[in-house]
Image: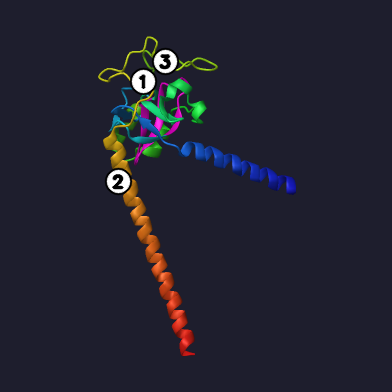
Amino acid sequence: MRTRRLLAALVAIAATGVAAAHAEPGYSTANVNMRTGPDIDFPRVTVIPEGEPIYIEGCLRDESWCDVRWGPDRGWVYSEYLAFDYRGEMVPLPDYGAAYFRIPFVTFAARDYWGRYYVNRPWWRERDRWYGFKVRPRPGWRAPPSGKRRAGWWRDGYHAPRGMRPPPDRGWRRPSRVEHRHDRRDDRRDDRRDRREDRRDDRRDDRRGGDHRGHDRR
């Protein structure tokens, strides 16, 4: 019994560690399209502005595309336009790789993915077309090397997707307007939390005051 309890505790600790690793956001390093699948022919969900925090749920095995969350939206983005804050420096995801940041490798099945995230979205009526669509290898993208990577390995012979500028080099910084907007959003969230806590404290004090008055009458 003790062994089973210990094993369960270790599993819980490990799961907590993985969850904590995934809780750290990545950032978009350009205004980048989010699509409903890992191919440029899939419909566009939205454009993620440069500098926005996003959560990366998984990447294809060749790391050409990653499945991300941004606000209420979910979809697929080019991996080289995603970056992490690593030891105080923003680094493109392919420099270290998805596994290094504890991002799982995933596969894409349109029927399952669309059924989870796109029911009743404008492109939902065309779902049968996309269920049968064959995802193609991304043109011009090379699978990452095995073993330790050289920073910028993927830039050799790289050409940015049509209509986009090349991803920034290491050391890219988020636009100040984005940081300030999110700082204000965090401040508003903190203010709301403080007000809720103040109201709870006031109600607690009122209840205690009522109890004291009752005791005084007796």
Crowdedness of circle 1 by 10 Å Cα count: few (<14), some, many (20+)?
Answer: few
Q: How far apart are marks 2 and 1 (CA)?
A: 28 Å
Which of the two discs, 1 and 3, sits closer to the camera?
1
Q: Position of residue 56 (x, y in %)?
A: 42, 33
Residue placed farthest to the bottom in the image? 218
Amino acid at pointer 2: Arg
Q: Name the residue under label 3.
A: 154
**Residue 59 is inside the magenta segment:** yes
Q: How far apart are marks 1 and 3 (CA)?
A: 12 Å
* Labels 3 & 2 near each other (Cβ < 8 A): no
Q: Which residue is drawn at 31% across and 35% down?
A: 124
Q: Where is residue 181 in the image (x, y as percent from the top left)?
A: 28, 41
* N-term-proximal mark, 3 vs 2: 3
Residue placed farthest to the front in the image? 88
Numbered mark located on residue 38 in the image: none
Amino acid at pointer 1: Asp
Residue 164 appears in which quarter of the rendering?
top left
Q: Residue at x 47, y 87 (%)?
A: 216
Q: Where is residue 121 in the image (x, y as percent from the top left)?
A: 30, 38
Q: What element carries label 3?
A: helix
Q: Residue at x 32, y 43 (%)?
A: 183
Q: Where is residue 173 in the image (x, y as percent from the top left)?
A: 34, 29
Residue placed farthest to the left in the image? 163
**Residue 107 is inside the magenta segment:** no
How is colour applied across the structure in the image? rainbow
Can see residue 122?
no
Q: What stretch of residues is rendered in magenta?
A: 56-78
Q: Mark 2 points at which residue?
A: 184
